[in-house]
Amino acid sequence: MAVQVKTILILGGTGDARALAERLDARGDLEVITSLAGRTRTPALPPGEIRVGGFGGVDGLVDYIELSGIDLVVDATHPFAAGMSRNAFQACAQSETPLLRLERPPWREGEDDQWRMVPDVQKAASALPRGGRALVTVGRQELAPFAARSDVAVIARMIEAPDTRLPENVLVILDRPPFTYADERALMIEQKITVLVCKNSGGVATQAKLTAARDLKIPVLMVARPELPEVQSVTTAEELEALLVRGFNV
Ligand code: NAP
């Protein structure tokens, strides 16, 4: 079935989602609604309509899609926002609404990198060598298992401060991507980092830490992406727009 699209729901919370909303809104022939979970207190807002907060599970999303006359859902959430992606898959199947995913490719280990892949943040926290100094970049929501490692100095970089008090082994650094190679390298040297922990988010905005770690011979605990349902996917906002213009089938 060829899809005719007028009203698009973008499941957002990423730079890619924002770039897509900007691109599609600028066309002037589409109604673009971006949905944010509401986790960030001061999010960088895209143009177009914004809605904030959970839908109330699969049924809530089905209701929203039907009441708002959504013709296409684009899952542009972060590759680790697996709950939202699974809900979107089910809700679109139930409401027979086309679903596309905008997902940047994962990073790949290069010859001089020293990566150890781990399946989740808990495993990453337990794999930290005792007495080390870890730069942890997994976000404030998933800091708990690292904070619990009182035998490791945790330098946790995130966009917004956590709501809870953290133990003395955790130093919080607040900063927002993009990060440059020079800044990442300087941070790792200044903080005497011995291990880097990150999620395999992909993309250029946060990639410099991997190059800096490689050059400083710092090992990386790389959290692998969660498994997601199979969905027709593109890797850039440009590709997605081209697909809309060209027309696509579901
Ligand atoms: P998640 O665990 O996959 O989702 C949990 C619940 O949060 C969903 O079931 C949904 O609630 C709500 N939700 C998530 N994304 C939403 C959206 N875009 N619009 C409306 N509701 C949303 O999500 P998460 O990992 O906490 O991520 C939350 C947001 O942060 C996402 O927008 C994601 O793109 C962004 N983000 C996540 C990460 C990460 O590492 N996980 C990194 C950067 C940005 P209901 O069931 O009530 O609908």
Image (cartoon, helix red, strand yellow):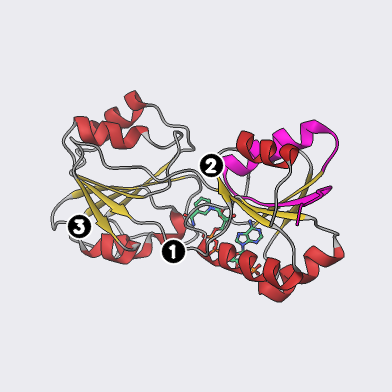
- The image quadrant in which ligand 1 is located: bottom right
Residue at the far bottom: name it: 59
Tag of residue 186: none
Q: Is label 1 in contact with label 3 (beta carbons under 8 Å)?
A: no
Q: Secondary structure at mark 3?
A: loop
Q: Position of residue 242 (x, y in %)?
A: 68, 36
Q: CA distance from mark 1 to mark 3?
A: 24 Å
Quarter-wise, where is residue 211 in the image? top left
Residue type (three-letter) at the residue carrying disc 3: Leu
Residue type (three-letter) at the residue carrying disc 2: Thr
Q: Is label 2 in contact with label 3 (beta carbons under 8 Å)?
A: no
Q: Secondary structure at mark 2?
A: loop
Label 1 beta carbon within 8 A of ligand 1: no
Magenta region includes residue 90: no
Q: Earlier in the sequence, mark 2 or mark 3?
A: 3
Q: Residue at x 85, y 60 (%)?
A: 68
User: What quarter of the picture does the C terminus occupy?
Assistant: bottom right
User: What quarter of the picture does the N terminus occupy?
Assistant: bottom right
Q: CA distance from mark 2 to mark 3?
A: 32 Å
Residue 37 against residue 93 in the figure, above or below: above
Label 2 beta carbon within 8 A of ligand 1: no
Q: Which residue is mark 2?
A: 235
Q: Is label 1 in contact with label 2 (beta carbons under 8 Å)?
A: no
Which residues, given as a range, are shown in magenta?
1-30
Which one is closest to the eye, mark 2 or mark 3? 2
Instruction: Please rate how many residues cluster around mark 1, counting C-alpha atoms within 10 Å: few if below 14, some from 14 to 19, many from 20.
Output: few
Q: Position of residue 97 (x, y in %)?
A: 74, 62
Q: Residue at x 64, y 56 (%)?
A: 38
Q: Which residue is mark 1?
A: 227
Residue at the far front: name it: 1
Q: Which residue is mark 3?
A: 128
Depth order, front residue of 51/60: 60
